[in-house]
Image (tube, rainbow, N blue to C red):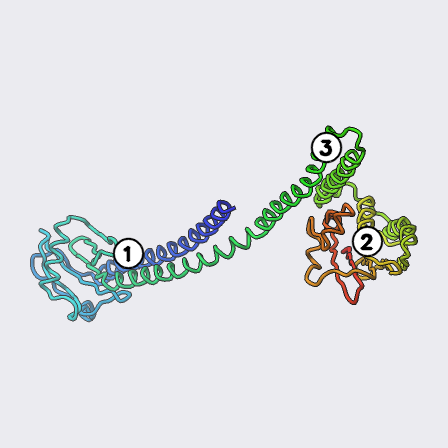
Amino acid sequence: MDKLKNKVFWVIFLILTIFTTSVFVVYNAQQYNGERLEIVRNFSQIERMGERENLPIGNNEPPQMPEQFEKKDFKNIRYIDNTVYTVLLNDDNSISEIVNHSSDDKTDEEIEALANDILAEGRESKVGNLYTCKYSYSVNNSTMVIIDNENTNSVLLKTLLISFGILLLIELLILFISTKLTNWIIKPVQESFDKQKQFITDASHELKTPLAVIMASSEALESNPDEKKWLENIKSESDRMNKLISDLLELAKSESIDDRSEFTLCNLSKTVEKSVLTFEGIMFEKGIALEDSIEDDIEIEMNEYKIKQLMSILLDNAIKHSESGGKITVNLKKEKDVVLTVSNLGEGIPKGDEEKIFERFYRADESRNRNENRYGLGLAIAKNIALSHNATITASSDNGETTFKTVFKL
């Protein structure tokens, strides 16, 4: 069970982590690509602007700026908060003039040194890694355009760090969610596993007693062949084992709640009436009064044999827990759903045990039920039969009256 729990936890945790991480990776990648595309656009825009203004480049003499070009504020050209430095080159790739730069950033000497480093690389353009690369540049004809990436570096790194911090917080949340989801998913399996272990323990215990008696009686019979009581003990305990095994097989069959192959449209009213008539003689012998109110011609899709079995369990249970002179009431009516109730006056259900009585091997009075060869499987079978018919069954006790209510949903 621990292995299953760990597997479920890691599957949930990894799926949520991969999804969340992918979202943050995609978001940061889009931010990065957006900034990179903006820088490429800036290069194209500067190049087109230079072509429109017909900037003279590549002469040995210092270039003369056209009147309309001189009107531009080259001291503070910025694109999306990035400072742009423009450097004019001679034919031999020596620096002719630094056309513009922001006076608050770098000196002419620093820009010239930077331009010489770029020329030494021998590349026409480079955007580089925007997280670490401080400058992007483009060399076209005899003009070098340098874009300061400092602001871009800051924005992208800040976005990355914030994303990482948020991701860590979300990972803690994912850890909590994964734990809760794992417990929620595993809970039915754990309950089933625990019930299975308890079932095996209870069944083994119930079978152990008659087997021990049979073995002891067999040994005694070998020593005293004339003693008939040993044979009687063997027969009695064999009957107990046979009853228990039959109940276990019936319980296993009743748990096949998805098997609706034998369901047909049947008259539930007549089935309930026949079941009541079957037990009427037993009630009369025990001095138990019977009252019934059964609405006519209620039809539902059902397995008639299993519904008869359900009624037998409920009526037998009512008789067993009714005192002489008591009363059993059977009602069947169709409202929004079909409601079947079986009530008896007498021994009630202990408080808090209303749900437990439908568990396998549950018995409120161990000694009495053992003497009567009752193993606490009947109501568990009844519950499974109800579930297979899309019905619910509940029990309640009030002032000595116990009622089993079965609701068939239409």
Number of the front mark, 2 or 1:
2
Q: CA distance from mark 2 to mark 3?
A: 35 Å
| Sequence order check, earlier mark of 1 and 3 | 1
Number of the front mark, 2 or 3:
3
Badge 2 marks a residue whose secondary structure is helix
Image-based side of 303 in relation to 26, left or right: right
Residue 170 visible in the snapshot: yes
Circle 1 packing at 10 Å, graded few (<14), some (14-19), many (20+), is some
Dot 1 corresponds to which residue?
A: 40
Dot 2 corresponds to which residue?
A: 320
Check contact, mark 2 vs mark 1: CB within 8 A.
Answer: no
Question: Mark 3 is on which residue type?
Answer: Ala
Front-most of residues 88 and 104: 104
Front-most of residues 120 and 187: 187
Badge 1 marks a residue whose secondary structure is helix
Quarter of the rendering containing residue 318: bottom right
| Sequence order check, earlier mark of 2 and 1 | 1
- In the rendered view, would you say 63 is above or below 237? below
Q: Residue at the left extreme?
A: 61
- Residue 98 screen position, x and y as percent: 12, 63
Residue drawn where x is 37% and y is 59% of the image: 168
Dot 3 corresponds to which residue?
A: 220
Instruction: Please identify the quadrant where the C terminus is shown.
Output: bottom right
Badge 3 marks a residue whose secondary structure is helix
Quarter of the rendering containing residue 336: bottom right
Question: Mark 2 is on which residue type?
Answer: Lys
- Residue 393 screen position, x and y as percent: 74, 56
